[in-house]
Structure formats: C-alpha cells, structure tokens
Amino acid sequence: MRGLIKSHKKKGSKEKVKKEKIKWESDEACKKLKELWNNLHYQRGNSGRTRKMPRKDTQKEKECQQKETQKETQKEKEGLQDDEVSNKDLKDLFSRLIKKLDESLSARLTALEGKVDDALTGELKQVNDSLQNHEDRLAELEKQQNEVINPQVDKMDTLEDALKELQDRIIQQEARSRKYNLLFYGIPKETGEVTHDIIVKFLHEKLSISLESAESILIENSHRVQKNPKSTYKPDAPEAVIVKFVRMEDRNMILNLARFKALPKGYAVRTDLPVHLKKKRGELARKAYELRKSGRKTRIRETKDDVILEYRPRDGKEWLTYKASV
C-alpha cells in the first residue's frame, strides 16, 4: 500500500516540476522587462528630463502581467484539480486496498474455519470412539461381574434363609428347654441359703400354698441368676431365683397364682424366656408401667416366639396391642 501511494506521489511531483519550470521561464521574461523599465526611469531621473516610453513597451508589460495573472489563476485551478484528482485517486486506492484486504481476510478465515472444523471433528470422533470403547469394556465387566456375583448372591440368600431357620430352631429349642422354668424376683438373699428351701417358704408365705403342698412340689433345679453388670434397672434389688419344675402342672399352677394374687411390692414371678425375648419383655414392662400411670390397664402376653404388650382403658373391655413407634 505504501508503494502504491509513493508511486502516485512521484507521478504527481513530475507534473508539478514541469509546470514550475514553465512558470519560472515566464517569470524571468517579466523580470527582464521590469529591469528595462526601471533602468529607463533611472536614466530619466538622472537627466532631469521626462521621456515617454514607447507605447509598445507599456502594452507589452501589460500583456505580460495579464499572462502572469492568467498563469497564476490557471495554476491555482490546476492545483485544485490536481488536489481533487489526487484525493479521488487516493480514495479509489484505499477502496481497492480495503476490498483486497477483506477478500484476503475472508479467504483466510474460511480456510481457518475449515481447518478448525476438521480438527474438532477428528477430536470429537476420537472422543466418541474412546467413550464407546469404555462403555463396551464396562458392559463386559458388568457381565462378568454378574456371572460371578449372582451365584454368590444366591448362595448368600440361601445361607441367610438357612441361618434364620437355624436361629428359629435354636430359639424354639431354647424356649422348650426353658418352658418348665420360672423366675422369682424380690426374694431377699440369706447367708448360707438353700434356694430350694427359700422357694418353698415363698410359696407358703406369699402365695398362700399350704406348707405340705409346697414341700410336695417337685423341683429339679434352682439357683440365683447373676445380674447383668451393665444393667441400671433396680441396682439394689436382689438377684432373681430361677427354678426348674419337674411337672408342668406345678409350674402353671404357681404362675397363675402369682398373676391373680396381689403380691407384695417388689415381688414378681415371670416365665423364663430366651435372652432376646427376655430383653424385649423388660422394655415392654417399663412401657406398661408408663401406661398404667396414665390410667390404663396392661398385660404382657407370651406367644410361641414373641412377647406382646396389650392395654385398655380401665372402664374398657377390648384389649389393644401396643406398637412401638419407629
């Protein structure tokens, strides 16, 4: 662009030099005429006489001045025209340059966009291929995992079912082994005591069974039950006495008497249950105490494999099953 402007300027400068040369030649001729006129006036002043200049020289001088004026006017017009032409040429030149730049930039941008699109398309294809490969590998691993794990899961389910069945059997066996047992709470501990004699005394004094009948009840085994050291429930209460009866009739008779006879405070007779049911019965007993304080009647029933708390209003007849809130 600078080269084009420079060449344009050189072309205009040559034309101006040519015009300046013509002007200089005309100016030299006018100067000579002026010098002749001044010399004549100088000679006239020295001689003290007035001389008339030839009419011809005055006419020539006027013509020369007119020509000079016309040349200057023409020069100004040509300068203005040259300036107008020069400005127009520059505008055209800039327009052509801008157009070429736009075309060049557009072409380069188009080429660059094509390259970017190609690069992005290639990279996206690679990413998609990589993702597809990962998905295929994950699907294959999941399939292999299912082939290995599913049989193990089935085995675990089978084992869990078998374990639950075994636990139920153990609980039932434990319940059967404990069904002849009764627990006696609140009996004071004596020095050198014999638990058999203590139970006979309890049956006679607290349940009003005759001494002869109490002594005739067959007891297979009896002893104190060690308290749980972590338990905080009635820490000062004496340890319970567990008694295993030989005959179920004796066991049921004593249990019924204890349920329907008002025992002194602190005394109680309970069935012997497996550990987890015994724990649940203790929790239900505490809840029953709260219900009785609110004016309800309560009872705890034992089923084959569970313990249930029931309650009803004091004036009501229908027993409702207590359900602990989750």
Image (cartoon, grey):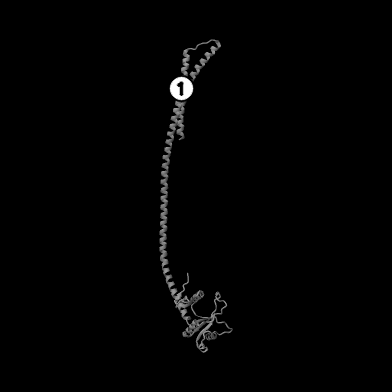
Tell me what residue is drawn at x 51 percent, y 17 percent.
34
Neighbours of disc 1 within 10 Å: few (<14), some (14-19), many (20+): some
- Asked where in the image residue 109 lies, by quadrant, the reply is top left
Q: Nearer the viewer, residue 304 or 78?
A: 304
Residue at the extreme bottom: 212
Q: What amino acid is labelled 1 in the image? A: Lys
- Residue 198 place in picture, x, y as percent: 55, 85
- Above or below, 217 against 74 in this view is below
Give SS at disc 1.
helix
Q: How many marks?
A: 1
Q: Quadrant of the N terminus?
A: top left
- Above or below, 58 against 154 in this view is above
Disc 1: which residue: 71
- Residue 31 place in picture, x, y as percent: 50, 18
Is residue 310 among what the camera can see? Answer: no
- Residue 46 place in picture, x, y as percent: 56, 11
- Residue 99 place in picture, x, y as percent: 42, 38
Tell me what residue is drawn at x 41 percent, y 58 percent.
135
- Above or below, 313 against 36 in this view is below
Q: Nearer the viewer, residue 28 or 126?
A: 28
112 relative to 46 in the view: left or right: left
Is residue 153 among what the camera can see? Answer: yes
Tell me what residue is drawn at x 46 percent, y 23 percent.
73
